[in-house]
Image: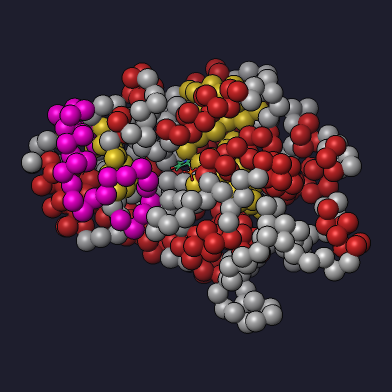
Amino acid sequence: MAGDNPKGPPPPFGFETRAIHAGSRPDPVTGARNTPIYQTTSYVFEDAEHAADLFNLQTFGFIYSRLTNPTVSVLEERLANLEGGRAAVCAGSGHAAQFLTFFTLLEPGDEFIASRNLYGGSITQFGLSFKKLGWTCHFVDMTDPENIRAALTPKCKAIFLEILANPGGIVLDVEPIAAIAREAGIPLIVDNTMATPYLCRPFEWGADIVVHSTTKFLSGHGTSVGGAVIESGKFDWAQNDRFPTMTQPEPAYHGLTFFETFGDFGFTTKARAVALRDFGPSLSPTNAFYTITGIETLHVRMERHVENALKVAKFLDGHPAVDWVSYAGLPSSPYHALANKYLPRGAGSVFTCGLKGGYDAGVRMVETVELFSHLANIGDTRSLIIHPASTTHRQLSPEQLRAAGAGPEVIRLSIGLETADDLIRDLDRALTA
Ligand SMILES: *Cc1c(COP(=O)(O)O)cnc(C)c1O
């Protein structure tokens, strides 16, 4: 199972080496050098006892691809390794990964605190759909960590944030927030989609769980939707009585206790063995293959994404039709110092700008660009543009729009890997049109 390495932690290879090799090796049967797509639903048992042991979680192995698949396992191990975590479980999308995380943490009636600066879909998932499951999310402005302390209730079981927020170019001060979570005895969950482990590793700053939409920079080419949950292995689920899900016997597995039995990979094991098993949002082996292939060039792509983003942000910052640019990579950004601390290799390649012409100018711009694609995604090799107020964030109220950094005049850009001067020319033409 992912991360279960009896020889202890891997030797300290560099990030680039691990992005290419972690979790994979030549196929032991055929010698195939690349990780094969194990396009199979199920796996032959050695005998009846082996089957029973697998079903009882007494041995690791493959039963059925809703739970585990060898191609997906390689991706799980690679992501756990790159984040510096203990183990991972993949899911069919970033939203599915968030669902697996919270289903594993919460009981009906439980609460959690989330940053109000989140991907629009996460605000809807947490605020509306989770409510139907009896889970209450309190959204707070985490640019002042004290707001979190003020919002904590005895029923709060987690704190959730995006360290580099989508869409606003906001960087949160994770270290003091992790201290608040530690003091409260609850895990800090960080969505690291926008930064990727190349730019930031939240476990180094005190996070307990990292979630990803691998759909974005990790797969990197706009081909494959996917998600992942990674645990640090350091959270003590038995420190208080808030996590019976981890410390009490699980009826679905003959009274097995996940924390006692699996220890530092108990959380992802439970997310797989219960939430993934019973709700089924599994990652397909083919999408895992595309994502593994994407990760092999993550370090090279992120360097260029960041370089291009800085060039484009500087250009927009000086353009007469642009009111403001919110990119933490610019020295003028109020988040520049935090970016230097948490994202020393660059502040990602997704950022927003405000057009002087407001809502109408935003709509006109997305319709005028040619090289940029007008669509709802980020983290592609191609440069992407969207007007959040009329698309991704249109479910939100005007007040929520402002709070999420997605007001009517806001344009979100995801800067790709094309020639920077071509991107600048395309934007200039659209802004001047
Ligand atoms: C896209 C995204 C998600 C949701 O992921 P899907 O793969 O689309 O389900 C969550 N968080 C962030 C920051 C995202 O950009």
When the figure is inspected, residue 31 is found, relative to residue 415, above or below; the finding is below
Quarter of the image where one finds residue 271? top right
**Viewer-proximal residue among 165 and 386:** 386
| Spot occupied by residue 37 in the image (x, y as percentages of width and height) | 58, 67
Quarter of the image where one finds residue 103? top right
**Viewer-proximal residue among 158 and 147:** 158
The C terminus lies in quadrant:
top left
Q: Which residue is drawn at 76% across and 58% down?
A: 63
Q: Given the current orientation, which residue lies at the most extreme front position?
A: 41
Q: Can residue 329 be seen in this view?
A: no
The N terminus lies in quadrant:
bottom right
Q: Which residue is drawn at 72% across and 57% down?
A: 64
**Viewer-proximal residue among 102 and 349:** 102
356 drawn magenta: yes
Q: What stretch is highlighted in magenta?
A: 353-382
When the figure is inspected, residue 24 is found, relative to residue 363, above or below; the finding is below
Q: Residue at x 37, y 61 (%)?
A: 301
Q: Is residue 349 visible?
A: yes
Query: In the image, 429: left or right of 388?
Result: left
